[in-house]
Image: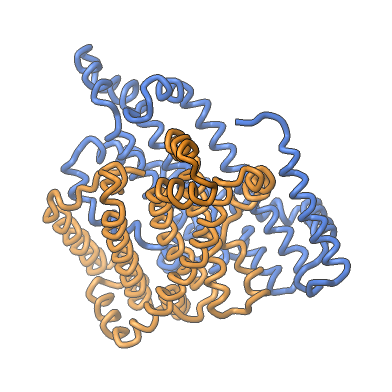
């Protein structure tokens, strides 16, 4: 990993931004579709100051958070399925079918059953995040080196200690990889459900600003959404590396094959 | 993600579970816990599926053809950019920051921009889905090139291969398994995003079928559309698993055996 600012990359971004600004000012591109970057940024500042952008974003993040929290209920099921071949052979085909559904689709029956509002959004996020979390937890449990379990068994640790002090920490890398897949999916699904039938949230605001031809605001929201996605992913990386400090050290000792 | 697939272990138990769920669903509908018209019974769903039958292939074709076009377009761009990043350090250093900034952007946030640029037809769906599925290809190609055994590169240099020849005969074959794995993930992503775009802009395709059924309150047709979408997704998944296993057979169980 390189330290310090990435000057070359920053220069490239600056060039792209400058090219956009100049092209828009000279009207090389249709000005209605490509407003100048400065007017997009002005719109961004205005929307932030007025509170419309932060409010919509907070709404979306709330639904995402609630859905992800609900999907955390898949952790015990994943641990169980990783330990029990019999459970997986029972629920396997059902899970395989459900996870090949595009998760945004599930917002529709949820709307019929639960009405319009936050509930169908939260359900769709829950549905989207459940399967990566379930499957990665299961993989994580299955990938625990038998040495760990045998050692614990030899030392006659209690079942509860086996679960909380051996299995859970050893399966944590798998759980985090599931969460890494689930997080961007949850964001996408929350936005799609807001676009389909929502009355608020950043996805709804985005589609509305296009429909009312408020193009600078549309670009401003796209910027906000990209930034939010980046911050979420980076935040998860930081949490992961602080939780799994033991793992990276252990992996470098044992090599990749046994992890 | 490597995962041992146990679908064939005890398939009967899995299908018995599906039958049990269907029976449970029928019982819930018959008991009248859920208000009339919100949750159709499995029988009503199958009825709606057969009634829609003659028009279904056209919708499936619309979804699948756009998915494949997006996959081809996004896959080519992603692989090309990823290979470029792996092979040319200058390109990587310059554009890495910009690409890492663009990558967390949820693809569906581009729907409004796509509407402005392409209108509401197929090019919009293809462009958004292609954007989404370019990323897994980019990552896998870049990391595949980075992961080439240095010994192979040293050998190529020793026997005097030129740059183009090294790329053609050493780097591409060595990065091939990773690229195929990336492409496999990408097709799933393309399908999910394609259906999501159809949900937001219900013109044609399976997502549009579900979306219009939900708006009209035809719950039987909605669940039928979901069932059909799930089956198409499942078929696509199995087809891909089979294809990757064939393609990667000679690379050993590490690549061909995994999920």
Name the quarter where the N terminus of chain A is drawn: top right
Q: Where does residue A259 sit, x and y in percent of width and height?
A: 35, 29
Image point 85% across, 72% down: which residue?
A27
Q: Decide which of A7, B39 is in the foreground and name it.
A: A7
Choose between B39 and B124: the one closer to the eye.
B124
Q: Residue furthest front?
A: B160
| Quarter of the view holding residue A84 | top left
Q: Is residue A241 left or right of residue B223?
A: right
What residue sits 35% from the left and 78% below the top? B221
Number of numbered discs overlaid on the protein picture: 0
Indicate the position of residue A173 as horizontal and vertical percent values: 41, 32
Figure chain in blue:
A
Image coords of residue A245 (percent x, y):
48, 23
Direction top: furthest residue: A155
Quick check: can you spot residue A223?
A: yes
Asked which colour scheme the image uses, the reply is: by chain
Which residue in the rendered view is the most extreme toward the right?
A26
Report the side of A96 relative to B178 (left or right).
left
* Residue drawn at the location 63% of the way across and 79% of the way down: B119
Is residue A67 something one can see in this rendering? no
Instruction: Check the image and name the residue furthest to the bottom.
Output: B54
Chain letter for the orange part? B
Q: Is residue B225 above or below residue A223?
A: below
Vertical comparison of B82 with B93: above or below: below
Q: Residue at x 44, y 70 (%)?
A: B67
Query: In front: A105, or B146?
Result: B146
Horizontal and vertical percent for residue A110?
A: 42, 63
């Amino acid at each position: 990993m390189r330290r310090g600012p990435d000057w070359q990359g920053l220069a490239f971004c600056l060039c792209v931004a400058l090219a956009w600004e100049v092209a828009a000012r000279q009207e090389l591109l249709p000005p209605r579709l490509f407003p100048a970057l400065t007017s997009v940024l002005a719109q961004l500042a205005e929307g932030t100051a007025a509170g419309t952008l932060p409010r919509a974003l907070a709404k979306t993040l709330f639904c995402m958070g609630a859905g992800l929290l609900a999907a955390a209920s898949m952790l015990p099921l994943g641990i169980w399925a990783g330990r029990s071949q019999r459970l997986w052979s029972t629920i396997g085909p059902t899970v395989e079918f459900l996870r090949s559904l595009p998760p945004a689709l599930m917002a529709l029956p949820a709307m019929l059953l639960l009405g319009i509002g936050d509930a169908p959004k939260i359900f769709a996020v829950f549905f989207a995040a459940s399967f990566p979390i379930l499957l990665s937890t299961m993989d994580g449990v299955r990938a625990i080196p038998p040495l760990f379990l045998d050692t614990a068994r030899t030392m006659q640790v209690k079942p509860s200690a086996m679960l909380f002090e051996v299995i859970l920490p050893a399966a944590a890398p798998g759980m985090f990889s599931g969460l890494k897949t689930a997080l961007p999916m949850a964001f996408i699904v929350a936005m799609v459900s807001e676009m389909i039938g929502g009355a608020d949230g950043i996805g709804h605001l985005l589609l509305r600003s296009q429909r009312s031809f408020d193009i600078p605001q549309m670009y401003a929201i796209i910027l906000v959404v990209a930034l939010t996605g980046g911050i979420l992913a980076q935040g998860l990386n930081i949490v992961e590396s602080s939780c799994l400090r033991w793992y990276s050290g252990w992996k470098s000792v044992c090599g990749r094959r046994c992890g | 993600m490597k995962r041992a697939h146990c679908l064939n272990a005890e398939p009967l138990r899995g299908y018995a579970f599906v039958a049990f769920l269907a029976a449970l669903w029928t019982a819930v509908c018959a008991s009248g816990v859920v208000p009339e018209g919100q949750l159709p019974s499995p029988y009503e769903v199958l009825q709606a599926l057969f009634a829609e039958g003659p028009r279904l292939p056209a919708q499936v074709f619309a979804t699948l053809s756009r998915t494949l076009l997006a996959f081809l377009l996004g896959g080519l761009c992603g692989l090309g950019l990823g290979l470029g990043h792996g092979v040319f350090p200058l390109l990587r250093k310059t554009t890495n920051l910009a690409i890492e900034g663009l990558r967390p952007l949820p693809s569906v946030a581009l729907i409004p921009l796509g509407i402005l640029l392409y209108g509401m037809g197929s090019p919009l769906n293809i462009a958004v889905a292609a954007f989404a599925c370019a990323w897994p290809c980019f990552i896998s190609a870049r990391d595949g090139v980075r992961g080439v055994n240095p010994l192979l590169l040293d050998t190529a240099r020793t026997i005097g291969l030129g740059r183009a020849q090294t790329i053609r005969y050493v780097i591409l074959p060595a990065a091939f398994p990773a690229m195929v794995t990336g492409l496999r993930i990408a097709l799933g992503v393309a399908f999910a995003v394609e259906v999501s775009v159809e949900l937001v802009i219900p013109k044609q395709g399976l997502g549009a079928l579900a979306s219009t059924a939900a708006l009209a309150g035809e719950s039987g047709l909605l669940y039928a559309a979901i069932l059909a979408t799930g089956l198409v997704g499942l078929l696509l998944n199995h087809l891909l698993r089979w294809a990757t296993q064939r393609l990667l057979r000679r690379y050993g169980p590490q690549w061909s055996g995994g999920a």
